Amino acid sequence: MMKYITTISLLILVTKLSIGQISFLPNDISKYKDYLPENIKKITQHKCESILNVSEYDKSKNLIFSYYKQYVGEEWNFKYLTMITGNVYNESGQILKSYNLHSNAGISIWYYEYDDKGNNTKTFMKNNDYEHHDSLINQNPYHFISEIKKIQDLINHTRIKDIELNAAKYLFLEQTHDNENNLITEVAYKENGDTSSLQRYNYDENNNKIYFRNESTIGKWEYYYENKKNKLLQSVRINYDKRKKRNRISYITFYKYDIKDRLIQITKYDKGVFQDKYVYEYNSLNQVTKRLSYVYDNEKLSREEKYEYNKEGNVIKKIDQDYRSEKEKIIEYMYEYEYYK
């Protein structure tokens, strides 16, 4: 089962494109430390009567608890997916342990080790695979986690304690770094010790990533990156075609910036054919106020999203105009803020 939660975790890392103070996962409220209010302890996001998001921080603004709830549909068991992360830090602000819960995929606990430079070198995992719930995938079998809304309830939950007591710990990730602390290799392992994936990275003289290669049980692919003045201008993905036994160019993505170095456009082509384009507009606080989407047609606007913010920098209103369906959706959010005294 944990191959699913691992895939989902990696997918979140890849797709969570954060621009300025906003990411484009639905109703996500996560932020970089610099954008958080001073002395913030907890942020709770509401939509109508439902809690959709909770972010809890320590006094150093380290995220110690994250609760994220996403609507799937009326036909989905309990209607929502819930994802929860809890982090435990050492005195240096490094994560020693993280709890990762997904209502559809399962529960895992990650344990981190570091070298003397502070680089994460090994990650061990315990998970609930011993429960043999693979047959319940896509039935939201762990929907009960939606009731966990703070870090202490997470740590003290009986299912978490059961995993810590009964599950076997195994080496999940092993990483190496260069003299500049850049990640060079990352190897992922299965519970039986077999390698499930190998990833390699190369960098230029300014420590910008210029190459990435993945070899895994699901395939092989590479990315080449072009940078200028430390800004990513272009990425090219090359896939290995098993049938023809050769490499072929897949995605090419272009990035544009304004005079303030803010990302204003992302355009992607697949095998030379236009796929999509996103155009961003900002206010004076560098908050995204509008996103325009073009899908399969470089000139035809598919979707327009507008954002309004409160003084704390969180989205309070989203106006979503879908020109393909000719439907407009207006979503409003409310927030509670708790501060350290």
Image (cartoon, rainbow, N blue to C red):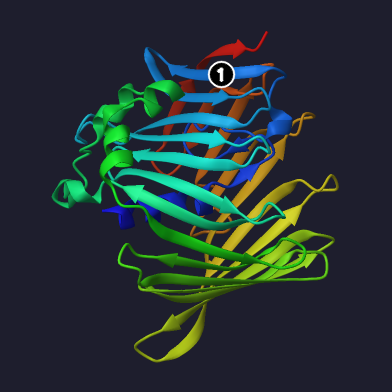
Q: Nearer the viewer, residue 182 or 305?
A: 182
Q: Residue at x 48, y 23 (%)?
A: 54
Q: Secondary structure at mark 1?
A: strand
How crowded is the residue under tag 1: few (<14 C-alpha within 10 Å), some, or many (20+)? many
- Which residue is under mark 1? 42
Frontmost residue, 252 versus 160: 160
Residue 274, visible in the rendered structure? yes
Of 176 and 303, nearer the camera is 176
Relative image position of residue 276 (x, y in whole percent): 53, 57
**Residue at image coords 34%, 88%:** 243
Q: Tag 1: residue type?
A: Lys
Q: Is residue 125 left or right of residue 45?
A: left
Question: In the rendered view, would you say 96 is above or below 3?
Answer: above
x, y (%) of residue 217?
36, 73
| Quarter of the rendering occupied by the C terminus | top right
When asked about the image quadrant of residue 144, the answer is top left
